[in-house]
Amino acid sequence: MRGPDLIIRGGTLFGMTEDRSPGLYSIAVKDGRVSAILPPDAPANADRVFDASGMFVAPGFVDIHIHDEYFQDTDTVQHCLIRQGITTAVAGNCGSGPSFDKSFAARPRPWLHLSFLVGNCAGLREEVGHSDRYTPATADETSRMCELLRDALSKGAIGLSLGLEYAPGASYEEIMFLAAVVAEFRDRIITVHIRYDDHRCVDAVREAAHLSRMSGARLQVSHLGSMTMGYTRQCEKEIERAVSEGADIGFDCYPYDAFCAKAGSAVYDDGFAERWNGKGPECLEAVSGRFKGNRLTFETLAEMRKEEPLGLIVAHVMEKAEVEDCIANRSCVIASDALFSGGGAHPRIAGTFPRALRILREYGYGWEDALRKMTAMPADRMRLPAGRLFEGSPADVIVFDPDKFTDRATFKEPFLPPDGLKLVVINGEPVLENGKMSEEPHGDFYRRGN
Ligand SMILES: [Zn+2]
């Protein structure tokens, strides 16, 4: 009988099933799956052996919130994710996921495992010809959107994403009809970029919770800390209250005190300074195009919005301590919101997971609990077959040096990969080894069966 294809030997293994505590083990991999979890000194009888002594070994990270809708840039986004240890991701968030047929059609094999949400803006409103984001969809448009959504979910999309701040015209009635379609399918989910990012964010979270409870659909509030400046704890309490009353609602957060959105989006419409307690254009930094690297003025902002609506603007408006408290909430899962547009990016694209791991350790988290917020917990929210290592699990594994694993990406250099990640295995294949990417992608598209 043929031996294993790969043995990762003698590392400290985390993220197994609940009956197994972390400890020194070797992992054998065969045909893309974990074939055995062995003693650390198991014989090295495989085609390839990776010596993990002194290293930590964990399931690959599961990132439930990325943007990978701009197909010409997928390699850049996916490589950045792999270089921070992510092996499974969910694309199409914040309302921007295209129709399911478009997200699968003509796409090359992904570098990591990729599943899709259909977005209410790009995938539904635009598909039925409703291009005005400030007006509600008509009854006829809404019923066609429901049909498109039902079709996508029946083909394997894992849920619906709502970008309510980006489509202020989307009425509660419109999203309630869509939520009811999601609830027809078992185990699907709605992710919500909530409607407001100012003092009304608490009401916006209430709207999302109400949508979940009235429709029965599971729901995830996206990048909570980035939209709830000054009110994050209050918003967490709203979610906790809904959960205690039986709703299936979760939330995620990325570990930075600045958010970012496309220049042309409704986020930067007139009145943003009033929304953010007087924080004006001096808090806004262009990360692509003509004004790259500069803080903006009302004039340069207007120019950028007109000339480069797809260019990215970073808004330095949140409080570090408030965001980190959110990350440390036991219910919060880590998600990157990775986005690459107009040639620019926010450092969350390359640094989120090692950075969050470091922050959680500073908050007193043990390694197993901290890693769970990046593996099993997000996988469970999205019901993905990922995030745990056991005999028969997908062989999506990372190996890192616990003393050196840290983010390096900055607002000036957002693509800098982290230090200390030694190996990333996807489907049993080494995809990143000592800093070098494999020549071929080894990920799979994931479709939910009915
Ligand atoms: Zn968003």
Image (spheres, rainbow, N blue to C red):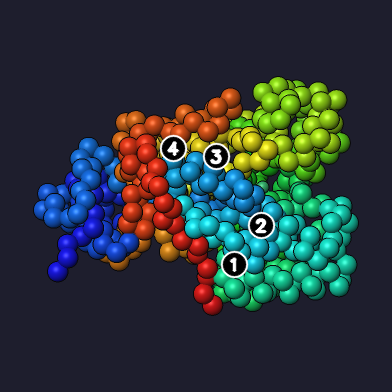
Q: Quadrant of residue 254?
A: top right
- Specify which label sits upstream in the sequence, 4 or 2: 2
- Give the residue type that dot 4 points to: Pro
Q: Residues within 10 Å of mark 3 (few under 14, many from 20)?
A: many
Residue tagged 4? 354
Residue at left offset 20%, top offset 40%: 53
Which quadrant: the N terminus? bottom left
Residue tagged 2? 97
Residue at left offset 48%, top offset 43%: 79
Asked if the residue at tag 2 contacts the one at tag 4, i.e. Cβ–Cβ closer than 8 Å, the answer is no
Residue at left offset 50%, top offset 62%: 445
- Specify which label sits upstream in the sequence, 1 or 2: 2
- Specify which label sits upstream in the sequence, 1 or 3: 1
Left or right relative to 39: residue 422: right
- Specify which label sits upstream in the sequence, 2 or 3: 2
Residue tagged 3? 349
- Disc 4 from disc 2: Cα separation: 26 Å
Asked if the residue at tag 2 contacts the one at tag 1, i.e. Cβ–Cβ closer than 8 Å, the answer is yes
- Label 4 residue SS: helix
**Residue 210 placement (x, y as % from top left):** 71, 62
Q: How crowded is mark 4: few (under 14 residues within 10 Å), some or many (20 or more)?
A: many
Numbered badge on residue 157: 1
